[in-house]
């Protein structure tokens, strides 16, 4: 259920100090396009369910797990009967751990773990989800600490899976090269943590490369290798994300939003914001503050099995 919806933006009413909300959803009700700053995990317990992200639809069978990243516009479609777990939590809970903010940038808009794939990652996340459900429903002492610990375990596992895939790209037959890849990964993670702390400042590629101990050209190459985006693409993604938060949660002028997000000029802000979101900052603010029908091709079209 969506309790507070302002335009397309949902404000999640977390039920406790943990910044987490879990409920057994049995409603025969579709939820329209919306987005929120929290991360959302959906796991059908019986029957099926559908998640729509843009024009793409994802069919969930019983036991499948869908993780919807922070700030992603999505819709949900329910069958006449069935039950699913919907877990929402404040992404800021993870930001106290330096690698986690970078991990959320690495994850796709929607991460889908299929029960039928029988992967180690699925089994791990499924086990922790069941434990979280049990702890949440039992409401025993130290419940919050137990759930928080298991949420961290899930994201540590996801982070190690994501980074391991990058290391595997190297030549595993040459021990020295694998060691070097791990060293590079550590450097890039530290660089991302530095960007996460300083993105609102006049941060440059040269400065970050120098702090990382590499030349600008070498740093540029390994950053793109591990992050699958350039330094400036990552930096701008952080700035645009901050701008989005200010646009829907404050009445700051567009110029003030730009300056408070780390952009050096209004023109640079408008150009970068539009390249990421496909609309101007003012258009984005209007869209989230008043309901705008989804574009043609949305709705229930595009569902996949």
Image (cartoon, grey):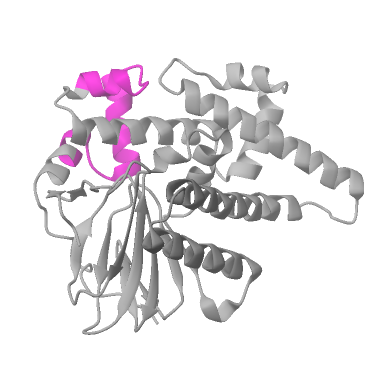
Residue 303, visible in the rendered structure: no
Residue 33, visible in the rendered structure: yes
The one nearer the camera, 38 or 217, is 38
**Which quadrant would the C terminus be assigned to in this image?**
bottom left
Q: Position of residue 139 (x, y in %)?
A: 38, 57
The answer to which image quadrant residue 42 occupies is: bottom left
Identify whether 282 is placed above or below 152: above
**Which portion, as a residue range, is magenta?**
255-284
**215 in the magenta segment:** no
Q: Position of residue 99 (x, y in %)?
A: 58, 37
What residue is shown at x 35% (from left), y 42% (from top)?
276
Q: Position of residue 196 (x, y in %)?
A: 49, 28
What residue is shown at x 35% (from left), y 44% (from top)?
19
Magenta-highlighted stretch: main secondary structure? helix
Identify whether 134 is placed above or below 21: below
The answer to which image quadrant residue 300 occupies is: bottom left
The answer to which image quadrant residue 223 occupies is: top right
**Which quadrant would the N terminus be assigned to in this image?**
bottom left
Extreme residue in the left direction: 290
What residue is shown at x 58% (from left), y 77% (from top)?
117
Q: Is residue 11 left or right of residue 235?
A: left
Identify whether 166 is placed above or below 77: above
Extreme residue in the front direction: 141
**Count of marks overlaid on the render:** 0
Q: Position of residue 126 (x, y in %)?
A: 53, 68
The one nearer the camera, 296 or 257, is 257
Q: Is residue 179 left or right of residue 116?
A: right
**265 in the magenta segment:** yes
What residue is shown at x 55% (from left), y 81% (from top)?
116
């Amino acid at each position: 259920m969506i309790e507070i919806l302002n335009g397309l933006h949902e404000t999640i009413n977390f039920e406790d100090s943990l910044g987490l909300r879990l409920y057994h959803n049995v409603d025969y009700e579709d939820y329209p396009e919306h987005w929120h700053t929290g991360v959302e995990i959906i796991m059908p317990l019986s029957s099926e369910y559908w998640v729509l992200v843009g024009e793409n639809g994802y069919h969930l069978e019983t036991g499948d797990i869908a993780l919807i990243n922070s700030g992603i516009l999505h819709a949900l479609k329910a069958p006449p009967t069935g039950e699913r777990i919907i877990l929402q939590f404040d992404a800021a809970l993870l930001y106290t751990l330096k690698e986690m903010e970078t991990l959320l940038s690495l994850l796709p808009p929607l991460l889908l773990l299929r029960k039928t794939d029988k992967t180690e990652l699925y089994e791990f996340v499924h086990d922790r989800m069941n434990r979280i459900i049990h702890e949440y429903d039992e409401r025993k002492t130290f419940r919050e600490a137990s759930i928080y610990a298991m949420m961290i375990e899930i994201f540590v596992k996801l982070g190690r899976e994501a980074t391991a895939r990058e290391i595997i790209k190297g030549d595993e037959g040459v021990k020295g090269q694998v060691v070097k890849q791990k060293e590079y990964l550590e450097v890039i993670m530290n660089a991302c943590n530095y960007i996460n702390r300083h993105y609102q400042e006049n941060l440059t590629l040269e400065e970050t490369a120098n702090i990382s101990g590499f030349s600008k050209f070498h740093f540029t190459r390994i950053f793109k290798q591990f992050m699958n985006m350039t330094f400036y693409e990552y930096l701008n993604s952080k700035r645009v994300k901050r701008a989005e938060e200010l646009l829907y949660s404050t009445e700051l002028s567009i110029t003030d939003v730009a300056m408070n997000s780390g952009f050096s000029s209004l023109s640079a802000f408008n150009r970068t914001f539009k390249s990421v979101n496909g609309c101007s900052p003012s258009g984005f603010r209007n869209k989230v503050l008043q309901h705008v029908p989804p574009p043609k091709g949305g709705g229930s079209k595009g569902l996949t099995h």
